[in-house]
Amino acid sequence: MNSRPFPVPRLGPYADRPRSHPPGGRPHLPLRPLWVCRACGGPWPCAEARLLLRIEYDAQPVDLAVYLSGLYHEASHDLFRLNPQDGPTPRDLFERFVAWAPYRRRPATPPPPG
């Protein structure tokens, strides 16, 4: 059994989204520093949180990408400090936090020859 206390989360971005739905319901927010969902216990962002975040940020996909990128950074720090030997890889965390978001840049098209 590990007798070390959990590390204190840093003062980075505060995960206050998605808002609870229905209002007054239990929000799908992360429990730090473990980064599990407070409502369902799954890895955050859980499926419900992803759905609610997509709805909430529907008109601002870049804002969602920035928000999730900040939380990715915080989660990387927290989870590495909790378990530096066999915690999730940066790629796994990127897939979990950022890659699913709807913001995508179109590939650059080369100019026509000539």
Image (spheres, grey):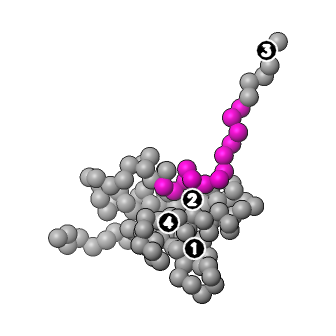
Q: Which residue is mark 4?
A: 46
Q: Secondary structure at mark 2?
A: helix
Q: Which residue is mark 1?
A: 16
Q: Which residue is mark 2?
A: 68
Q: Secondary structure at mark 1?
A: loop
Sequence-first tag of 1 and 2: 1
Q: Image quadrant of residue 70?
A: bottom right
Q: Secondary structure at mark 4?
A: loop
Q: Position of residue 57 (x, y in %)?
A: 69, 64
Residue occupying the point 57% across, 73% down = 16
Residue occupying the point 75% across, 61% down = 59
Sequence-first tag of 1 and 4: 1
Residue occupying the point 60% across, 87% down = 24
Residue 65 horizontal side relative to residue 81, left or right? right
Above or below 62: residue 105:
above
Is there CB contact under 8 Å for labels 4 and 3?
no
Residue 93 visible (yes or no): yes
Between tags 4 and 2, which lies in front? 4
Figure quadrant of the C terminus: top right
Q: Position of residue 3 (x, y in %)?
A: 20, 72
Q: Give the residues drawn in magenta, as a range.
A: 96-108
